[in-house]
Image (tube, helix red, strand yellow):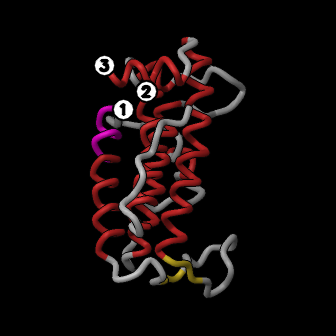
Amino acid sequence: MATHVPSEEYGDERGALLAFLEEQRGGIRRSLLGLTDEQAAARPSASELCLGGLLKHVAEVEQSWIARARGEEPAVHRDPSNWHECFALVGDESVESQLAYWEKVAAETEAFARSVPSLDDTFPLPDQPWFPPEGRVSVRWVLLHLIRETARHAGHADIIRESLDGKTAFELVALAAK
């Protein structure tokens, strides 16, 4: 369920992009309201997706893209040996710890987006087979990509949550407002 995104200050493209990203983050956070770590790990469909895993994934993805935009390595390196951990809480990871991590990542994203001289500034894509060789993208592109990625998984989260206990996005928005 979409919530209202307040209008940006006239001409504040960065603010608009960050507001839409935050709206989509809220959809995933709301889907976790009132759940235990065990419930957040449940996979109520044929899919391997669970709410805790979606939370971890979007936080990792956001951190990795902003790190790349800064010219840094992502905090977590994923490859075939650990890809299976991308969508699951492992070890001592919990919903609470992942929410706290994502909050930190979100603050870093906002600080970065507001600090770059221009949203047109570019950075190189990683050397991966699914990216064009020597490809580059802009800061604007990465913010739009993060909105798309987070929105896609917020939709997954809606379906998973409703499958777990029947709570819909409408009920979760009302619960979050309390």
Q: Nearer the viewer, residue 62 or 168?
A: 168
Q: Write the residue at 51% across / 47% down.
A: 86
Pick the front one: 41 or 158: 158
The residue that label 3 is drawn on is: 178
The residue located at (34%, 83%) in the rendering is: 117
x, y (%) of residue 41? 49, 26
Q: Main secondary structure of the magenta part?
A: helix
- Residue, disc 1: 95
Residue found at x 42% / y 52% = 7
Circles 3 and 1, Cβ within 8 Å, touching? The answer is: no
Mark 2 or mark 1: name the one nearer the start of the chain. Answer: 2
Three-letter residue code for mark 3 = Lys
The residues bearing labels 2 and 3 have C-alpha atoms spaced at a distance of 15 Å
Of the image marks 2 and 3, the number of the one nearer the N terminus? 2
In this rendering, would 134 be left or right of 25?
right
Within 10 Å of disc 3 (Cα), the crowding (few <14, some 14-19, many 20+) is few
User: Which residue type does callout 2 highlight?
Assistant: Leu
Q: Secondary structure at mark 3?
A: loop
Three-letter code, disc 1: Val
Using the rendered view, name the quadrant where residue 173 is placed. top left
Q: Secondary structure at mark 1?
A: helix
Which residue does the numbered mark 2 point to in the structure image? 32
| Magenta-highlighted residues | 96-101
- x, y percent for residue 102: 35, 47
Graded by Cα atoms within 10 Å as few (under 14), some (14 to 19) or many (20 or more), the crowding at tag 1 reads many
Q: Is residue 5 above or below residue 76?
A: above
